[in-house]
Amino acid sequence: MLNTYAEALEFLYEKLPMFQRIGSIAYKADLNNTLRLCEAVGNPQSKFKSIHVAGTNGKGSSSHMLASIFQSAGYKTGLYTSPHLKDFTERIRINGIPVSQHYIIDFVNRMENVLENIKPSFFETTVAMAFEYFVLEKVDIAIIEVGLGGRLDSTNVITPELSLITNIGWDHKDILGDTLEKIAFEKAGIIKENVPVVVSERQTGIDVVFINKAEIENASLYFAADDYHVERYDEDGEALVRISESNSVLFDGLKLPLQGFYQQKNVAGVLKAIDILQTRGWSIPHESVGHGLTNVVSQTKLKGRWQKLSDKPLIICDTGHNENGIKEIIMQIHAQQYDRLFMIIGMVKDKDISSILKLLPQEAEYYFCEAKIPRSLDAAILKDQAASYGLTGIDVKNVNEAITMAKERASANDMIFIGGSTFVVAEIENL
């Protein structure tokens, strides 16, 4: 019998294979364990309404925006995302409030024998936990973010109201495939029979994968970029957003707290999803959409997406960690005003980091660090590999020590960026 939250977490982390810590050997490429776990807790996957969100980048932000909009519209809204940044309870929320520690202790105690018997992964277990919690708490709807891929992801046991696919890029090639078409095929696996699907972006050579899958499943398919245009502009030093649909302005002067350039693509997908859901009986007033978007951070507690930590010097962190995500980040870094640039970067060792290192700005002063997880690439090794791409700096194992050193070097007009891995951002103190 486990008596404390700390004991329950220790059981989950130590007894169950966790992808975030040990990588692909924790990935279970079928849904059998998830289905068995769900059966053990009364098959909750069929007892609540949901929206399923997949994609290489943007699925987390899109999930939070959807959850915030539904919350603003008055619905009791569940949100399941991964990984967490600071505490496990962040993964399972209702109206922005994290799952109770008491429930987690109770779940592990009730399920300990089942878990010992099935031997599921950490992620499979958290999916069953989240689904049961949403049923017990009687949510009106839950936004479910895919963990990895889609077709064989543990979350893919639901039949949602709508599926949303954000974009396709290079990530987890060892698991999802070595071409963008293969990766898209895995993401398209969340498309269900007669369930509408929204794709946020149009991508040459990729669209046909979704078109074919939607045709097979008789699922209505919508490309958000065809209907929505999201434009960012500055007014009196403040970044604002203008959103148009078919040349008609829906919102202007919107203060979107998610300041990443890449969010413009995500917003289009979210708005098209809301549009379709309104036609399916969900009451989501125009005012609730605007309120949900402008209050997404305060309502869902989303962190780590182009998040400003300081003005002088400008300190930004972002969880973007694959080639497409880093491209967007570098583009936005170059759009900032600063005298000198400091980069605090850490990565995991089971990824192709060469595709990322070649994108990073050579003029920056680097602090190579590592998060406290087994998957982290040793900071000294990262520094040596980065040198071959013209990136120079020092290795500092501790993330916060690196931040302190960079702040000591930086002046008020400089910029410090922290990222390269979700787990580096997660270790920033007072985030």
Image: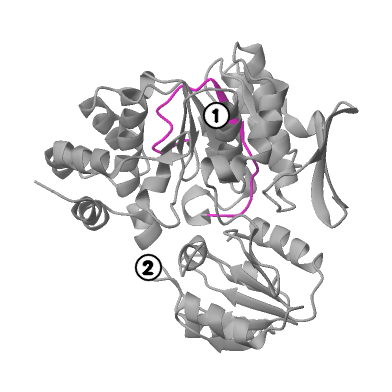
- Magenta residue span: 151-171
Helix, strand or loop at label 2? It is loop
The reply to whether the magenta stretch includes residue 336 is no
**In the image, is residue 177 above or below residue 14?**
above
Horizontal arrangement in the rendering, residue 70 relative to residue 313 (left or right): left
Which tag, 2 or 1, sits closer to the chain's start? 1
Query: Which residue is located at x 74 percent, y 78 percent?
Result: 414
Helix, strand or loop at label 1? It is helix
* Amino acid at pointer 2: Ile
Q: Quadrant of residue 320?
A: bottom right
Percent x, y of residue 112: 15, 42
The reply to whether the magenta stretch includes residue 165 is yes
Cα distance between the residues tagged 2 and 1: 34 Å
> Mark on residue 373?
2
Percent x, y of residue 72: 59, 28
**In the image, is residue 360 above or below residue 166?**
below
> Mark on residue 71?
1
**In the image, is residue 382 above or below residue 170?**
below
Query: Which residue is located at x 76 percent, y 42 percent?
Result: 204
Percent x, y of residue 26: 33, 53
Q: Name the residue nearer the viewer: 154 or 101.
A: 101
Percent x, y of residue 381: 49, 83
**In the image, is residue 20 above or below residue 167?**
below
